[in-house]
Image (tube, grey):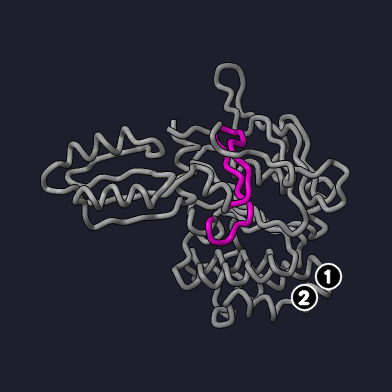
Amino acid sequence: MTTAADIITAPDELAPTRSAPDTAVAVEGLRRHFGSGERTVKAVDGLDLRIRRGEVVALLGPNGAGKTTTLDMLLGLTDPTAGTVSVYGQMPAKAARDGVVAAVLQTGGLLSDLTVRETVEVIASLHGREALARVPDVIDRTGLGALVRRRIAKCSGGEQQRVKFALALVADPDILVLDEPTAGMDVTARRNFWDVMRADADGGRTIVFATHYLEEAEQFARRTVVMHRGRIVADAPTAQLRASLGGRTLAANLPAGGGDALVRHLRDTRGISDVRVDAMRVSLRALDSDAAASALLNAGAHDLEIAAPTLETAFTALTED
């Protein structure tokens, strides 16, 4: 089984120095514990992280890994037990007040009696005239044009999530923090959301997001940080992390006769690992997928499938006990 030690972590090119002028987020020795004594829960247990201006970073981890707590401290919503976190050199709470960082969170309610337009305008007014002038464009970009007169109480969960997205954009922040941003959205709304995010990222905005939809991280994040039990267990460019397990996955139906011999041969072949048989179908990982495919087909196996490594495969290897 591949372990966290087998995955590349914290590459030098992703760890600028403390004084680097392009550092958007700097986290050092960050800890957040809840409770005391034997009941202490170490939600975040010693994080060191640098995020550069303009990076798009996915924060992944199973439930309880510490992702949301980390984002809460990044936004100034929760104070660290120990360690420091800064946003462009500022305390997180001040950066949030100044509109430097904004967020789309899972939690946090909206005023149910206001309409969608009124909600966006109220928040925009807190950021001044320039933000108010951006309201029509933000409503258009977030696909809320048809909902502007609808009261928040009448909006679905996915629609309310899009309203939160508009509230985050109206301040035109340098950093967007997204915690499960597409939860409750349908497929079309989710695709539109990421189209807007992709355009913002291309324009230089720094985006940090946590998601359980691994395909979103795989398609959108340029860098992936994996957390497990309050700590970072992998930090690398997404494509590099995805490929770090090595090899491709192959699956095929075993021949009617000689299947046992073929499986033994595969397990004894160097460069082939994780050989598993379910009913009459064998799956494996191979460094040389062409050679493995030839061995399968020459032995009479059929219905061959070959797949490149996925982020889900790496994520599972890193976080399974």
Q: Is residue 107 visible?
A: no
Q: Eyeballing the image, is 41 above or below 23?
A: above
Above or below 217: residue 26: above
- Name the side, left or right, on which 79 lies relative to 106: right
Few, some or many C-alpha atoms within 10 Å of disc 1 (few <14, some 14-19, many ≥20)? few
Place residue 17 in its image quadrant: top right
Q: Secondary structure at mark 2?
A: helix
Tag 1 residue: 128
Q: Amino acid at mark 2?
A: Leu
What is the number of callouts on the image?
Answer: 2
Query: Which quadrant does the N terminus fall into?
Result: top left
User: In the image as oriented, which residue stretches furthest toward the left?
Assistant: 257
The reply to whether residue 227 is visible in this rendering is yes
- Tag 2 residue: 132
Q: Which of these two is toward me, 12 or 316?
A: 12
User: Which SS class for mark 1?
Assistant: loop
**Residue type for callout 1:** Gly
The answer to which quarter of the image holds residue 176 is bottom right
Which of these two is toward me, 173 or 219? 219
- Could you tell me residue 263's position as x and y percent? 24, 38
Residue pictured at 56% horizontal, 59% vertical: 181
Q: Which residues are magenta?
A: 218-238
Task: Return the x and y of residue 142 as percentages of the image width and height.
Answer: 60, 74
Say whether marks 1 and 2 touch (CB < 8 Å): yes
Q: Tell me the chief SS of the magenta region.
A: strand
